[in-house]
Image: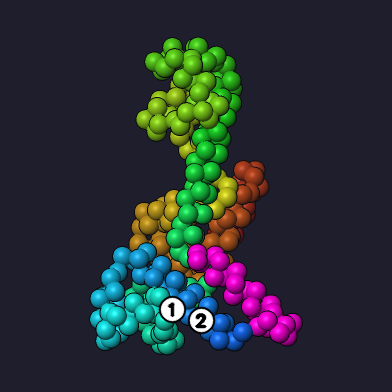
Amino acid sequence: MSFSDISARMRKQQENAATNAPVYDIEESYRVRARMVGVLLRDARLHARRSLEECARLLGIEPSLVETWEYGEATPTLPQLELLANYLDVPVSQFWSDSTLSDVQADRRAAQREYLALRDRMVGALLRQAREDAGLSQEALAERTGHSASELAAYEFGDSPLPMHVLTVLASAVNKNVSYFLETSGTIGELLALREAYRAFADMPPELRAFVTNPLNAGFIEIARMFSQMPTDKLRKVGEAFLDITM
Protein backbone atom coordinates (compact mmCIF):
# COMPACT_ATOMS: atom_id res chain seq x y z
CA MET A 1 0.00 0.00 0.00
CA SER A 2 1.43 3.38 -1.05
CA PHE A 3 1.62 6.41 1.20
CA SER A 4 -1.17 8.12 -0.76
CA ASP A 5 -3.40 5.09 -0.11
CA ILE A 6 -2.61 5.19 3.59
CA SER A 7 -3.27 8.93 3.70
CA ALA A 8 -6.59 8.54 1.88
CA ARG A 9 -7.57 5.78 4.26
CA MET A 10 -6.72 7.98 7.21
CA ARG A 11 -8.83 10.84 5.87
CA LYS A 12 -11.75 8.47 5.28
CA GLN A 13 -11.57 7.26 8.85
CA GLN A 14 -11.51 10.83 10.12
CA GLU A 15 -14.59 11.64 8.06
CA ASN A 16 -16.37 8.59 9.45
CA ALA A 17 -15.42 9.60 12.99
CA ALA A 18 -16.71 13.13 12.42
CA THR A 19 -20.10 11.81 11.24
CA ASN A 20 -20.26 9.12 13.97
CA ALA A 21 -20.39 6.46 11.25
CA PRO A 22 -20.50 2.93 12.75
CA VAL A 23 -17.71 1.71 10.43
CA TYR A 24 -15.07 3.69 12.34
CA ASP A 25 -12.49 1.33 13.89
CA ILE A 26 -10.30 3.03 16.48
CA GLU A 27 -7.75 0.20 16.54
CA GLU A 28 -7.40 0.38 12.80
CA SER A 29 -7.02 4.14 13.12
CA TYR A 30 -4.03 3.67 15.44
CA ARG A 31 -2.46 1.19 13.03
CA VAL A 32 -2.90 3.52 10.06
CA ARG A 33 -1.47 6.48 11.98
CA ALA A 34 1.54 4.40 13.03
CA ARG A 35 2.15 3.35 9.42
CA MET A 36 1.91 6.97 8.24
CA VAL A 37 4.48 8.08 10.81
CA GLY A 38 6.72 5.18 9.80
CA VAL A 39 6.55 5.96 6.10
CA LEU A 40 7.26 9.64 6.71
CA LEU A 41 10.14 8.80 9.06
CA ARG A 42 11.76 6.44 6.57
CA ASP A 43 11.24 8.95 3.77
CA ALA A 44 12.92 11.72 5.80
CA ARG A 45 15.80 9.44 6.79
CA LEU A 46 16.48 8.35 3.22
CA HIS A 47 16.14 11.93 2.00
CA ALA A 48 18.81 12.99 4.53
CA ARG A 49 20.95 9.95 3.60
CA ARG A 50 21.11 8.73 7.17
CA SER A 51 21.28 5.10 8.23
CA LEU A 52 19.17 3.28 10.80
CA GLU A 53 22.31 2.99 12.93
CA GLU A 54 22.97 6.73 12.86
CA CYS A 55 19.41 7.58 13.89
CA ALA A 56 19.50 4.95 16.62
CA ARG A 57 22.82 6.28 17.91
CA LEU A 58 21.33 9.77 18.11
CA LEU A 59 18.53 8.53 20.38
CA GLY A 60 20.57 5.95 22.31
CA ILE A 61 18.42 3.03 21.15
CA GLU A 62 18.82 -0.09 19.02
CA PRO A 63 18.59 0.23 15.21
CA SER A 64 15.98 -2.53 15.25
CA LEU A 65 13.62 -0.22 17.17
CA VAL A 66 13.96 2.52 14.56
CA GLU A 67 13.19 -0.11 11.94
CA THR A 68 10.00 -1.13 13.75
CA TRP A 69 8.97 2.54 13.75
CA GLU A 70 9.45 2.72 10.01
CA TYR A 71 7.31 -0.38 9.51
CA GLY A 72 4.58 1.06 11.74
CA GLU A 73 4.93 -1.74 14.28
CA ALA A 74 5.71 0.82 16.99
CA THR A 75 5.92 4.60 17.13
CA PRO A 76 8.41 7.10 18.57
CA THR A 77 7.45 9.76 21.09
CA LEU A 78 7.12 13.42 20.18
CA PRO A 79 10.47 14.34 21.87
CA GLN A 80 12.16 11.58 19.87
CA LEU A 81 10.60 12.91 16.66
CA GLU A 82 11.77 16.42 17.57
CA LEU A 83 15.37 15.21 17.84
CA LEU A 84 15.04 13.27 14.59
CA ALA A 85 13.52 16.26 12.81
CA ASN A 86 16.51 18.38 13.81
CA TYR A 87 18.95 15.62 12.83
CA LEU A 88 17.27 14.94 9.49
CA ASP A 89 16.84 18.65 8.75
CA VAL A 90 13.05 18.63 8.34
CA PRO A 91 10.28 20.45 10.22
CA VAL A 92 8.82 18.21 12.91
CA SER A 93 5.41 18.70 11.31
CA GLN A 94 6.69 16.62 8.40
CA PHE A 95 6.00 13.53 10.50
CA TRP A 96 2.26 14.20 10.41
CA SER A 97 2.21 15.62 6.90
CA ASP A 98 0.04 14.20 4.13
CA SER A 99 2.88 14.06 1.58
CA THR A 100 6.36 12.59 1.51
CA LEU A 101 9.50 14.53 0.70
CA SER A 102 10.02 12.35 -2.37
CA ASP A 103 6.54 13.34 -3.63
CA VAL A 104 7.34 17.00 -3.06
CA GLN A 105 10.67 16.60 -4.87
CA ALA A 106 8.96 14.92 -7.83
CA ASP A 107 6.45 17.78 -8.03
CA ARG A 108 9.30 20.29 -7.80
CA ARG A 109 11.25 18.56 -10.58
CA ALA A 110 8.16 18.60 -12.80
CA ALA A 111 7.66 22.30 -12.06
CA GLN A 112 11.32 22.98 -12.83
CA ARG A 113 11.03 21.27 -16.21
CA GLU A 114 7.97 23.37 -17.01
CA TYR A 115 9.81 26.50 -15.89
CA LEU A 116 12.79 25.74 -18.14
CA ALA A 117 10.57 25.14 -21.16
CA LEU A 118 8.63 28.35 -20.49
CA ARG A 119 11.75 30.43 -19.97
CA ASP A 120 13.34 29.07 -23.17
CA ARG A 121 10.29 30.34 -25.05
CA MET A 122 10.37 33.68 -23.25
CA VAL A 123 14.09 34.20 -23.95
CA GLY A 124 13.49 33.30 -27.58
CA ALA A 125 10.61 35.76 -27.84
CA LEU A 126 12.77 38.52 -26.33
CA LEU A 127 15.55 37.71 -28.79
CA ARG A 128 13.13 37.91 -31.70
CA GLN A 129 11.76 41.24 -30.45
CA ALA A 130 15.26 42.66 -29.97
CA ARG A 131 16.30 41.50 -33.43
CA GLU A 132 13.27 43.13 -35.03
CA ASP A 133 13.83 46.34 -33.03
CA ALA A 134 17.38 46.37 -34.37
CA GLY A 135 16.02 46.06 -37.92
CA LEU A 136 17.74 42.73 -38.56
CA SER A 137 16.41 39.69 -40.35
CA GLN A 138 17.27 36.21 -39.12
CA GLU A 139 19.60 35.86 -42.07
CA ALA A 140 21.39 39.12 -41.25
CA LEU A 141 21.80 38.16 -37.58
CA ALA A 142 23.00 34.72 -38.60
CA GLU A 143 25.67 36.26 -40.82
CA ARG A 144 26.84 38.54 -37.99
CA THR A 145 27.09 35.79 -35.40
CA GLY A 146 28.13 32.73 -37.39
CA HIS A 147 24.89 30.82 -36.82
CA SER A 148 22.47 29.53 -39.40
CA ALA A 149 19.04 31.13 -39.80
CA SER A 150 17.44 27.79 -38.90
CA GLU A 151 19.37 27.71 -35.60
CA LEU A 152 18.21 31.23 -34.78
CA ALA A 153 14.62 30.30 -35.62
CA ALA A 154 14.82 27.34 -33.23
CA TYR A 155 16.14 29.63 -30.48
CA GLU A 156 13.51 32.29 -31.09
CA PHE A 157 10.63 29.82 -30.91
CA GLY A 158 12.04 28.12 -27.82
CA ASP A 159 12.49 24.83 -29.64
CA SER A 160 16.18 24.73 -28.71
CA PRO A 161 17.65 25.91 -25.39
CA LEU A 162 19.91 28.91 -25.94
CA PRO A 163 23.41 28.31 -24.47
CA MET A 164 24.71 31.20 -22.39
CA HIS A 165 27.84 31.84 -24.48
CA VAL A 166 25.68 32.03 -27.61
CA LEU A 167 23.19 34.32 -25.90
CA THR A 168 25.92 36.81 -24.99
CA VAL A 169 27.02 37.02 -28.63
CA LEU A 170 23.45 37.36 -29.93
CA ALA A 171 22.60 39.95 -27.27
CA SER A 172 25.56 42.09 -28.31
CA ALA A 173 24.59 41.77 -31.98
CA VAL A 174 21.08 43.11 -31.28
CA ASN A 175 22.39 45.88 -28.97
CA LYS A 176 21.08 44.37 -25.75
CA ASN A 177 22.65 43.58 -22.41
CA VAL A 178 22.25 40.02 -21.09
CA SER A 179 20.19 41.44 -18.21
CA TYR A 180 17.51 42.24 -20.81
CA PHE A 181 16.74 38.50 -20.95
CA LEU A 182 16.59 37.91 -17.20
CA GLU A 183 13.47 36.73 -15.45
CA THR A 184 11.95 39.71 -13.64
CA SER A 185 8.63 38.34 -12.37
CA GLY A 186 7.51 35.34 -10.38
CA THR A 187 9.24 33.65 -7.47
CA ILE A 188 12.48 32.85 -9.32
CA GLY A 189 12.76 36.37 -10.69
CA GLU A 190 12.15 37.91 -7.27
CA LEU A 191 14.77 35.68 -5.63
CA LEU A 192 17.34 36.46 -8.31
CA ALA A 193 16.64 40.17 -8.00
CA LEU A 194 16.96 39.93 -4.22
CA ARG A 195 20.32 38.19 -4.53
CA GLU A 196 21.57 40.81 -6.96
CA ALA A 197 20.40 43.55 -4.56
CA TYR A 198 22.19 41.81 -1.69
CA ARG A 199 25.40 41.60 -3.73
CA ALA A 200 25.18 45.32 -4.49
CA PHE A 201 24.59 46.00 -0.79
CA ALA A 202 27.58 43.82 0.19
CA ASP A 203 29.79 45.80 -2.20
CA MET A 204 29.00 49.08 -0.40
CA PRO A 205 31.64 50.58 1.92
CA PRO A 206 31.20 49.33 5.51
CA GLU A 207 30.24 52.77 6.82
CA LEU A 208 27.50 53.11 4.19
CA ARG A 209 26.11 49.65 5.00
CA ALA A 210 26.04 50.60 8.68
CA PHE A 211 24.17 53.81 7.86
CA VAL A 212 21.58 52.03 5.69
CA THR A 213 20.88 49.29 8.23
CA ASN A 214 20.44 51.73 11.14
CA PRO A 215 16.64 52.16 11.65
CA LEU A 216 17.23 55.69 12.91
CA ASN A 217 18.40 56.69 9.42
CA ALA A 218 15.23 55.55 7.64
CA GLY A 219 14.04 59.14 7.29
CA PHE A 220 17.27 60.24 5.60
CA ILE A 221 17.06 57.31 3.18
CA GLU A 222 13.47 58.18 2.31
CA ILE A 223 14.48 61.78 1.61
CA ALA A 224 17.27 60.55 -0.65
CA ARG A 225 14.79 58.31 -2.47
CA MET A 226 12.43 61.25 -3.01
CA PHE A 227 15.28 63.39 -4.35
CA SER A 228 16.29 60.61 -6.76
CA GLN A 229 12.78 60.60 -8.26
CA MET A 230 12.44 64.37 -8.45
CA PRO A 231 12.56 66.06 -11.88
CA THR A 232 15.84 67.85 -12.61
CA ASP A 233 14.31 71.35 -12.62
CA LYS A 234 12.68 70.87 -9.22
CA LEU A 235 15.83 69.31 -7.82
CA ARG A 236 17.78 72.34 -9.02
CA LYS A 237 15.35 74.65 -7.23
CA VAL A 238 15.72 72.69 -4.01
CA GLY A 239 19.49 72.97 -4.32
CA GLU A 240 19.23 76.73 -4.87
CA ALA A 241 17.01 77.02 -1.82
CA PHE A 242 19.64 75.20 0.28
CA LEU A 243 22.27 77.63 -1.01
CA ASP A 244 20.08 80.57 -0.06
CA ILE A 245 19.70 79.21 3.46
CA THR A 246 23.44 78.65 3.96
CA MET A 247 24.56 82.00 2.50
Crowdedness near tag 2: few (<14), some (14–19) or many (≥20) residues, C-alpha within 10 Å: some
Q: Which residue is mark 2?
A: 31
Q: In the rendered image of this protein, does residue 69 appear above or below residue 173?
A: below
Residue drawn 51% across and 28% down? 159
**Percent x, y for residue 115?**
52, 44
Q: In the rendered image of this protein, does residue 101 appear above or below residue 62?
A: above
Residue 155 visible in the picture: yes
**Percent x, y for residue 23?**
68, 81
Which segment did they paint magenta? 1-24
Rounded to the nearest angstrom, the CA distance separating label 2 from label 1 is: 7 Å
Q: Main secondary structure of the magenta part?
A: helix
> Furthest residue to the front?
23
Q: Amino acid at mark 1?
A: Gly
Element at label 1: loop
Element at label 2: helix
Q: Is residue 70 left or right of residue 222?
A: left
The answer to the question of whether label 2 and label 1 lie on touching residues, with beta carbons closer than 8 A, is yes
Residue drawn 47% across and 76% down? 35
Q: In the rendered image of this protein, does residue 210 appear above or below residue 119?
A: below
Nearest the eye: 216 or 99: 99
Q: In the rendered image of this protein, does residue 93 appear above or below residue 198?
A: below
The answer to if 196 sits in the magenta stretch is no
Nearest the eye: 206 or 244: 206
Q: Quadrant of the C terminus?
A: bottom right
When asked about the image quadrant of residue 241, the answer is: bottom right
Label at residue 72: 1
**Percent x, y for residue 157?**
55, 26
